[in-house]
């Protein structure tokens, strides 16, 4: 009986206390943290050297404290497309999510730091993206669904189907969605099949339809997140 190798992770985070907390959580969960970095340039060097399974990256990092972390994450994906990326952000940023996803939505996560509920959910998000799935923060998904474009394919979805897609974007399985909505798994499966059809996602070999559905959600109307971002920043007094 073979033992599955632990997921290899590199962490990019400039805040020392937060970085140490992330490292502790990952190591306690049995993940192999092969390197950590406090700035984007060092993160890129270490990712090239170690070629991890997942890169956990803060968007705003030195040297410029702009979108240096995001740029490093995009470069990491270009170096080795199989490397999954889990972005950590302080605010909703539509352009960041779209830029990171590009044409390859598999293995991408976008979490807001303030809404990481607990260590278990954080580790679960890393495991999901490592398997090629998605882990999109519930607030990001809510902003997307709540500001739908009139010409978006999402307009054809029923309220329940949008709820299912929202939870799918958070990375929940059909069983997890059923538990959250207090319905049967078979009911969820019917909604998933219907929403796939409405979004034009035919079943094909080697196609991850759940991830493609999430990608449609993210791309439906990028400016909707810009509005949500402005609302959050004004509320924070920025």
Image: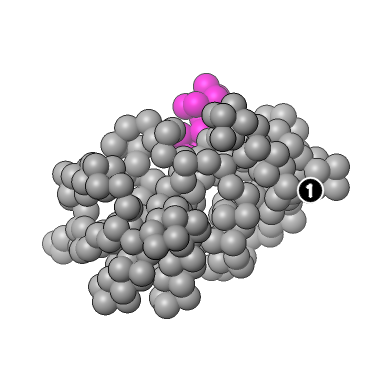
Mark 1 surroundings within 10 Å by alpha-carbon count, few (fewer than 14), some (14 through 19), many (20 or more): some
Relative to 155, 230 lies left or right:
left
Find residue 60 and report its horizontal and vertical position in percent: 44, 53
Q: Is residue 195 visible?
A: no
Find residue 155 and report its horizontal and vertical position in percent: 80, 40
Relative to 198, 41 lies left or right:
left
Query: Of residues 151 and 229, which is closer to you in this image?
Result: 229
Q: How many marks?
A: 1
Q: Is residue 139 visible?
A: yes
| Residue drawn at 69 percent across, 54 percent down | 219
| Residue drawn at 74 percent across, 37 percent down | 147
Relative height, residue 226 to residue 73 (above, below): above
User: Could you tell me which quadrant the C terminus lies in?
Assistant: top right
User: Could you tell me which quadrant the N terminus lies in?
Assistant: bottom left
The image quarter in which residue 86 lies:
bottom left
Specify start and end residues of the magenta stretch as a single range: 172-185
Relative to 121, 73 lies left or right:
right
Q: Which residue is mark 1?
A: 153
Residue projecting furthest to the right:
150
Relative to 135, 218 lies left or right:
right
């Amino acid at each position: 009986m073979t033992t599955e190798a632990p997921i290899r992770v590199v962490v990019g985070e400039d805040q020392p206390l937060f970085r140490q907390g992330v490292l502790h959580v990952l190591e306690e969960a049995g993940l192999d943290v092969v390197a950590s970095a406090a700035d984007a340039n060092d993160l890129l060097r270490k990712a090239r050297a170690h070629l991890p399974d997942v890169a956990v990256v803060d968007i705003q990092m030195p040297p410029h404290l702009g979108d240096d972390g995001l740029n490093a994450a995009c470069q990491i994906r270009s170096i080795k497309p199989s490397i999954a990326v889990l972005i950590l952000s302080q605010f909703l940023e539509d352009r960041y999510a779209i830029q990171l996803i590009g044409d390859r939505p598999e293995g991408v996560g976008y979490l807001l730091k303030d809404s990481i509920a607990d260590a278990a959910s954080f580790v679960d998000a890393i495991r999901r993206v490592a398997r090629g799935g998605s882990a999109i923060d519930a607030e990001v998904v809510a902003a997307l669904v709540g500001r739908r474009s009139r010409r978006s394919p999402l307009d054809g979805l029923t309220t329940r189907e949008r709820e299912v897609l929202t939870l799918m974007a958070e990375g929940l399985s059909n069983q997890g969605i059923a538990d959250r909505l207090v319905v049967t798994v078979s009911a969820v499966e019917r909604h998933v099949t219907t929403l796939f059809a409405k979004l034009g996602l035919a079943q094909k070999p080697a196609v991850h339809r759940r991830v493609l559905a999430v990608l449609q959600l993210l791309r439906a109307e990028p400016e909707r997140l810009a509005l949500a971002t402005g609302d959050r920043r004004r509320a924070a007094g920025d």
